Image (cartoon, grey):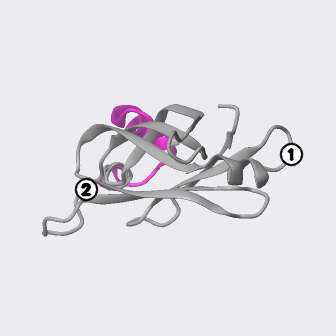
Amino acid sequence: DLRSKQKAETYKLLKSLWKGPKAHIDRMTESIYSLPFYEIEELKVHHEVEKTSGKSIGILRISLRIEGGRKRGRDDSPDTTFAIVLGSPARRTLLAHKSLGIRNGNSKKEVELRFDWSAANAAGGEGGGSMILRILIEEHRGLDSEILVGLSG
């Protein structure tokens, strides 16, 4: 939760909790803000029928606001890679996945996952059906999140 606050606010909070040297607070704050941070601004689910095959296709659109962390290497590879995985809760079926590489800095990314609507409904569980959206940050352990997404949108 500290990463979602403004840097000055985080510093002030750490300062009120820490009784040691001020340099430690500076290092703690910099360490927290070197991690990537993301926020889901919008999440929409809908389905459509594919005209050629008549198959029901589900579409999950995600709008992410990303604040990149500090670069870990010197090559031209992306600074942070997000793995976005969509699955069903009942049968643990993989419905869709996407890898998203980003550079440091602030950005907004639109992600679209297409999946088999019938499979999602069949394995969606009770209560109108749902899916599990997992967002993993490949370079950092412990920053993964899991969100339950209803099939009704």
Q: Closer to the camera, 113 or 78?
A: 113
- Residue type (three-letter) at the residue carrying disc 1: Glu
Closer mark to the observer between disc 2 and disc 1: 1
Percent x, y of residue 47: 59, 36
User: Separation of disc 2 and disc 1 at Cα?
Assistant: 42 Å
Left or right for 153, reference 3:
right
Q: How would you classify the magenta stretch by its main secondary structure? A: helix
The residue pinned by badge 2 equals 70
Q: Which residue lies at the image location 23% right of the left edge and 60% below the top edge?
A: 78
In the rendered image, the vertical position of residue 78 relative to residue 38, given as above or below? below
56 vs 22, left or right, is right
Image location (x, y in percent) of residue 90: 79, 58
Look at 36% across and 54% down and name the residue there: 35
Which segment did they paint magenta?
2-25
Residue drawn at (82%, 50%), measured in percent from left and top? Answer: 125
Outermost front residue: 52
In the image, 126 versus 146, the foreground residue is 126
Instruction: Name the residue beneath numbered marker 1.
Output: 126
Mark 1, Cα crowd under 10 Å, few <14 / some 14-19 / many 20+, is: few
Q: Magenta stretch: residue 112 in it? A: no
Label 1: state its secondary structure.
Answer: loop
Residue count near mark 2 (Cα–Cα under 10 Å), binned few <14, some 14–19, many ≥20: some
Magenta residue check for 5: yes
The amino acid at mark 2 is Arg
Residue 14 seen: no
